[in-house]
Image: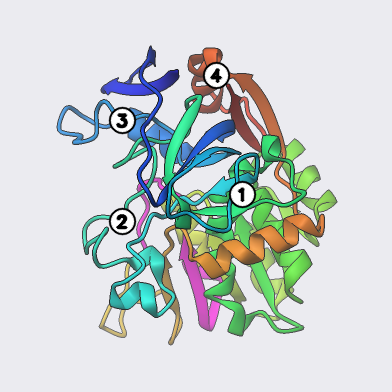
Amino acid sequence: MRALKLVGPGRLELREVPIPEIGDDDILVEVAAAGLCHSDLHILHQGEQWPFFGTTMGHETSGHVAATGAHVTGLTVGDAVLVRAVWACGGCRPCLLGRENACAVNGSRSAFPLTPGIGADGGMADFIRVAARHADPLGDIDPRTAAPLADAGLTPMHAVNSTRHLLDEGATVVVIGFGGLGHVAVQILRADTAAAVIVIEPDAAKRAAALAAGAELALNPDTGTVATLLERTSGYGVDVVYDFVGTQATLDIAAAAVAPEGAIRVIGLADGAVTVRASLEGERLPWGVDVQRAYGGTSADQSTVLRLAADHAIAVDTIEYPLAEAQRAFADLEAGRIAGRAVLIP
């Protein structure tokens, strides 16, 4: 079979490798689609010390069950499935409390839980081996378009669920960046909360798309952005900021616009920072603000994503590339030529 391997810093190769052998608790999935993410670009450009060279790329994968292990129940050959992006152990204290994205066995303080495409072979291939408990049935959802739900759906869903206590009727939230994850976040917020949504996005076409997706206002980031946000909330600030970019400029907007006891979710992987000062002098954050670096999500988050997708309340805009043209897809993503989510089709 073919598999897209990260073979060195900035180097991808589509190689012929054996079809994976599965264990008793595994399934073999014939890949229908594998999504590309900006985090894949970060992985691609890691330095020589990156420990996972030789791994098959891809943490957003959907397909059909091609074979099942002897102990597998609930899934049969031919079933359409979504492969989870967080491969937690399922038995540690955080997992048993429903916090699989903070798994204490397959993750640590400095490392996120095991993720296909990083520490294990991912889905940019013809087949992927998966523990059966890390695959969710898709039902009538088309696996050809479902792959990005594993991250572009899961990650914003987790960020929304972690702030749900702030999303009552009358709440105002900000989504920064209407890209692969941001465009799904707006749909989730409109479908599953009562909050008014404001999008901040420099691209005019994406701002128009944000309004079509349900945002009440779409702003071009400039020197008047914070003033506009404060004016919309009578000077109090917005309840939540979901930053899908993560630059210093976007996080500065978040810190200057968030309300007391509000929340900032840092989801983008740029090099910005939110500084919390113990002193009263120079502090920009209001009292009580909850700042969290968001990673992935839980099985409960994924269930909600799949419910919304099955109800046609959310959908991922996808652009298809043949697996053989993966290099072109990565180049288009890096050049900013992709609106929504690129998927590789074997």
How far is mark 1 from mark 4, CA to CA?
19 Å
Magenta span covers which residues? 255-274
Query: Helix, strand or loop at disc 2?
Result: loop
Residue that label 1 marks: 149
Q: Amino acid at mark 1?
A: Leu
Label 4 sits on a secondary structure element that is helix
Q: Earlier in the sequence, mark 1 or mark 4?
A: 1
Image x and y of residue 99, in percent: 41, 72
Q: Amino acid at mark 4?
A: Leu
Amino acid type at image mark 2: Phe
- Find out whether the residues at labels 3 and 1 contact each other: C-beta distance under 8 Å: no
Q: First in sequence: mark 4 or mark 3? A: 3
Residue assigned mark 4? 323
Q: Is residue 187 above or below residue 163?
A: above
> Which residue does the image show at 32% across and 67% down from the upper left?
275
Q: Residue at x 44, y 75 (%)?
A: 98
